[in-house]
Image (cartoon, helix red, strand yellow):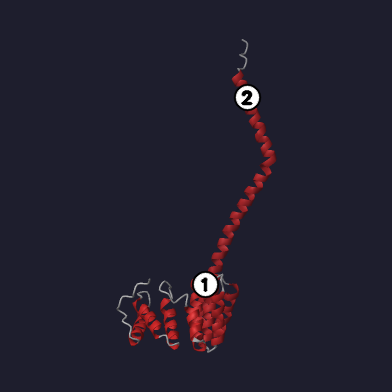
């Protein structure tokens, strides 16, 4: 029995399939090696990321232990040993531990009466734009507290201006320093209003609020009065 000749449709389908095979083969010859390289690179990158993450975790744990050891040395009076550990963290630690080490070094310097050295460390942190804003703000406040007696009142006012506002997390401390500086420049009315704001600020620590309230009252300001609306 003679075989049935292929229909035009079957013939076209066979040609189409052959053409696709040739195209795939050509694409593989052209891009196959590149695809393999890309896959290997992706796997290597992923493996590198996993290695980096594990190394970072181990490094953070080691730095945490070193910070704890430094604090233990300070509490035991071994300040020389503590200083070595702190200097290592400052030089090699991650951002968080580095800042903690800098604050600790400044506190040790201030405790030893080395106020200029302590202020210089805080000033360095406050000026470091790579650090998060809260770290810099705390450093600026501590620097100003240490240098307060050597600063002119207007210098204190200018330095604390960004922080002596009700939307600042450090309003209480910055506002109190500003108010005292205002009193020193004979601006009692401004100082009284600022102190009354501090006394009414529920986020400010109770002790500071009470002190601000007493000072405001002594300046003739009613801290219970609702502040006037701003135009």
Q: Is residue 184 above or below residue 225?
A: below
Q: How many marks?
A: 2
Q: Dot 2 surroundings within 10 Å: few (below 14), some, or many (20 or more)? A: few
For label 2, the SS is helix
> For the residue carrying disc 1, how many other residues have a C-alpha within 10 Å: few (<14), some (14-19), or many (20+)?
some
Residue displayed at 60% across by 72% down: 92
Q: Quadrant of the N terminus?
A: top right
Q: Kindly identify the residue that appears in the image at 45 percent across and 85 percent down.
A: 181
Q: Which mark is residue 191?
A: none
On the picture, is 144 further left or further right than 215?
A: right
Disc 1 is placed on an element classified as helix
Please report the residue visible at 63 percent of the width from the left and 27 percent of the height from the top: 16
Q: Which residue is mark 2?
A: 14
> Would you place residue 147 above or below residue 98 in this image?
below
- Distance from label 2 to label 1 (Cα)? 69 Å
Which residue is tagged 1? 64
As drawn, the residue found furthest toward the top would be: 1
- Residue 115 x/y as whole percent: 54, 87
Query: Picture quarter containing residue 48?
Result: bottom right
Would residue 26 be visible to someone looking at this image? yes
Residue situated in front as seen by the camera: 8 or 225: 225
Q: Is residue 75 visible?
A: no
Outermost residue to the front: 231
Q: Earlier in the sequence, mark 2 or mark 1?
A: 2
**Picture coordinates of residue 21 (x, y %)?**
65, 31
Where residue 160 appears, as percent x and y from the top left, is 47, 79
Q: Are marks 2 and 1 in contact (CB under 8 Å)?
A: no
Q: Is residue 29 left or right of residue 166?
A: right
Q: Which residue is nearer to you in this view: 109 or 117?
A: 117
Residue nearest the observer in this picture, 51 or 140? 140
- At x 44%, y 79%, the residue is 174
């Amino acid at each position: 029995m003679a075989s049935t000749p292929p229909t035009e449709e079957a013939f076209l389908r066979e040609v189409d399939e052959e053409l696709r095979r040739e195209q795939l083969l050509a694409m593989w010859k052209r891009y196959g090696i590149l695809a393999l390289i890309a896959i290997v690179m992706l796997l290597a990158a992923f493996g590198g990321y996993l290695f980096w993450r594990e190394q970072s975790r181990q490094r953070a744990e080691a730095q945490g232990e070193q910070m704890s050891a430094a604090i233990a040395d300070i509490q035991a009076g071994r300040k020389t040993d503590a200083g070595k550990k702190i200097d290592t963290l400052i030089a090699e630690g991650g951002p968080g531990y580095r800042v903690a080490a800098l604050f600790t070094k400044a506190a040790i310097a201030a405790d030893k009466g080395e106020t200029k050295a302590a202020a210089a460390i805080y000033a360095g942190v406050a000026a470091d734009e790579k650090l998060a804003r809260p770290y810099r703000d705390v450093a600026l406040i501590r620097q100003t507290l240490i240098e307060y007696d050597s600063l002119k009142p207007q210098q204190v006012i200018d330095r604390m201006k960004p922080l002596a506002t009700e939307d600042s997390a450090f309003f209480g401390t910055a506002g109190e320093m500003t108010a005292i500086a205002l009193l020193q420049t004979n601006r009692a009315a401004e100082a009284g209003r600022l102190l009354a704001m501090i006394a009414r600020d529920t986020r400010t620590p109770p002790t500071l609020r009470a002190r601000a309230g007493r000072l405001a009252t002594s300046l003739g300001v009613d801290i219970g009065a609702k502040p006037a609306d701003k135009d």
